[in-house]
Amino acid sequence: MVAAGTVATFLIAGGASLFMAWAIGAGSSGSTPFAPAVGANAISVMRAGFIVGLLGLAGAVLQGANVTEAVGRELIRNVTLSPTAATVALITAAVLVAIGVFTGYPIATAFTVTGAVVGVGLAMGGTPAWAKYQEIVTLWVLVPFVGGAIAYATARALRNDRVAERYAVPLLAAVVGAILANVEFVLLGPPGEAASLAATAATTVPSVSPSLASFGATLLAALLVGLVLFWDIRGDPAAGQRHFLLALGGLVAFSAGGSQVGLALGPLLPLLDPFEVPLVAVLLGGGFGLLLGSWTGAPRMIKALAQDYSALGPRRSIAALIPSFAIAQTAVFFGIPVSFNEIIVSAIIGSGYAAGGSDVSGSKMGYTALAWVASLALAFAVSYGVFTAVDFIL
């Protein structure tokens, strides 16, 4: 029998989680995936917000388990977050993200949630999870350099007159197809686990070694995607580029749902044990929160990223989205909370500098980087202080 007080505190924490999901949907996961496509005039702001909401919901359900588990159970040791701690962490992070949404500056959601969860966890007497922190910080530090460098190199190649665009773009599409073949989905794996198309092929062809079957499935996916785009771009290069750009935005939006839903739901996991709620049902609820945020609040941030950061064309937008998709799926695979604002903005900067950097707002980038660092420290300090005060009063 679950006590009435436990139910009440869970409902409060659940409300905070839903608010957090809305703020994330309105901010990072709802705005960043299609911002380059909007900047390239491939899709309208309102239509982008509508589509990204649906794709984010799908990603949350099909890929959200890894990051949700990491945020809920791996950021702090020797304690389990109480309902009060989860509520304080979620409200602190959500308020900071919401401030970013309404002021037009993209606050790094992963920074705020991680800082808030660690803050309340230490205030409860927990110990730091140093190994997990090393993974997280390593990815956070590498994202601007790796994502920006790949975007820069890709944009430079696409702008090179000696590189035939009718071959270069399908080749890039083939790379995306190879990555997609190795993306894990819960529908392909056994109960409670996820598997990729390549891994599934490795288990369904017993006469071939698993590594060879996986490689063959990856190569086949790359060839199919590359050939489809080659056929599309040969008839109408502009339309083919636009179709590829929109497909990339969709993949990044799906990946955003799989990663960002964990930031909203992770702190709730320890509270769900007495209720025996299936994780997929929780992910569905979090995905719905992301969808609402994308539909109601994302257009403002989409405009900010697409127009304020860089005047993007189709080539630079493609260059920005390819590393964004790859990095996002890497984070989902390893269960590392990552900020899509950091991913996309870094890629936009890299692709912008490939065109000389004249369209990139240096002051905007500086304020954004400062907001990222400040959000981590502020979320940690506020959540630690608020929980300590509340715990003392209660």
Image (tube, grey):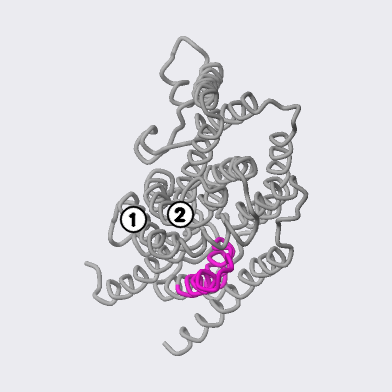
Which image quadrant: the C terminus? Answer: bottom left
Identify the residue at image location x=37%, y=57%.
Answer: 291
2 and 1 marks in contact (CB < 8 Å) = yes
Q: Secondary structure at mark 2?
A: helix
Which residue of the protein is positioned furthest toward the left in this rendering?
A: 1
Q: Is residue 230 left or right of residue 365?
A: left
Q: Quadrant of residue 131?
A: bottom right
Magenta stretch, main secondary structure class = helix
Locate residue 162, reporting x and y percent.
76, 27
Locate residue 123, reporting x and y percent.
55, 76
Which image quadrant: the N terminus? Answer: bottom left
Identify the residue at image location x=58%, y=26%.
Answer: 170
Q: Which residue is mark 1?
A: 282
Give the crowd class for mark 1: few <14, some 14-19, many >=20 residues within 10 Å: many
Is residue 238 shown above or below 64? above
Can residue 210 be seen here? The reply is no
Q: Which residue is mark 2?
A: 68
Q: Is residue 78 magenta?
A: no
The three-letter amino acid code for the residue at tag 1 is Val
Which range is magenta? Answer: 91-120
Q: Is residue 141 left or right of residue 96?
A: right
Q: Quadrant of residue 204?
A: top left
Locate residue 219, reporting x and y percent.
55, 20
Q: Nearer the viewer, residue 219 or 201?
A: 219
Q: Secondary structure at mark 1?
A: helix
Identify the residue at image location x=45%, y=48%.
Answer: 258
Can residue 278 be seen here? The reply is yes
Q: Nearer the viewer, residue 281 or 178?
A: 178
Locate residue 283, reporting x and y percent.
36, 53
Is residue 129 shown above or below 385? above
The three-letter amino acid code for the residue at tag 2 is Thr
Q: Nearer the viewer, residue 24 or 383?
A: 24
